[in-house]
Image: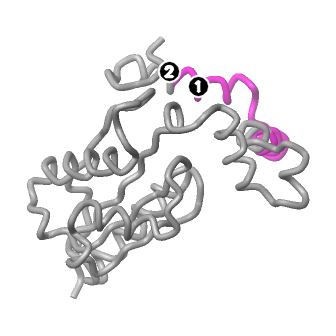
Amino acid sequence: MFNKAIIAGIGETPIGKLPDHSVLGLYALAAKAAIEDAGIDWSHVDGLITCGSLVDHYPRHALVVAEYLGICEQMKYVETPQLSGVSPFAGLVNAFRLVEEGTCQAVLVIATDKPRTGQSRNDSVNAFARMRHPEYEQPYGLTNVTAYALLAQYHMERYGTTPEQLASVAVTFREHAMKHPKAVYRD
């Protein structure tokens, strides 16, 4: 049986400095908003893909979130992809597969965190450093910013991308952020 997967609903949470919210609470807010936007009942959700947290370190993150949401027993599939910034996209691709193959009828894909309040700047830097190779990258201070700079430099050399073209991405993101009431930087 072939099912057509769609994105039926989305939900956003507050962002920025959130001392009054837990990470699990933010997951619950995002899930509730997405369920309401989709116009479905919680009982229809039988898959959950979470994107982990830099602040809360649960080894079985999706299972903890399912328990927190009170939907653990109805789950046919739970997962937390460990793919850093691409985790939400990988989760979405997997959710489409799960629905289209008939494993699940409705899969929540949730990504949220609160590093701006949940940990210090040094803890954030250290968390990103731990994602690097412990012998070759971590001791030398490679951070996400420097890693992406290396990727940008490689892209420029390989494809002839100009600094102006890369800068246009940042300008476009800021233009969109100015129109979004929940954006952290709106100028």
| Mark 2, secondary structure of its residue | helix
Residue 32 is covered by the magenta coloring: no
Which residue is under mark 2?
A: 174
Q: Is residue 67 above or below residue 31?
A: below
* Main secondary structure type of the part rendered in magenta: helix
Boundaries of the magenta span: 150-172
Q: Quadrant of residue 86?
A: bottom right
Q: Nearer the viewer, residue 149 or 125?
A: 125
C-beta proximity under 8 Å, tags 1 and 2: yes
At label 1, counting other C-alpha atoms closer than 10 Å, the crowd grade (few under 14, some 14-19, many 20 or more) is few
Q: How is the image coloured?
A: one colour
Residue matched to label 1: 170
Establish if 52 lies above or below 129: below
Give residue 172's position: percent from left, percent from top.
51, 24
List x then y, in percent, for residue 21.
35, 37
> Quick one: 105 or 122, which is closer to the camera?
122
Above-or-below relation of 17 to 61: above
Residue 180 is left or right of residue 173, and the answer is left
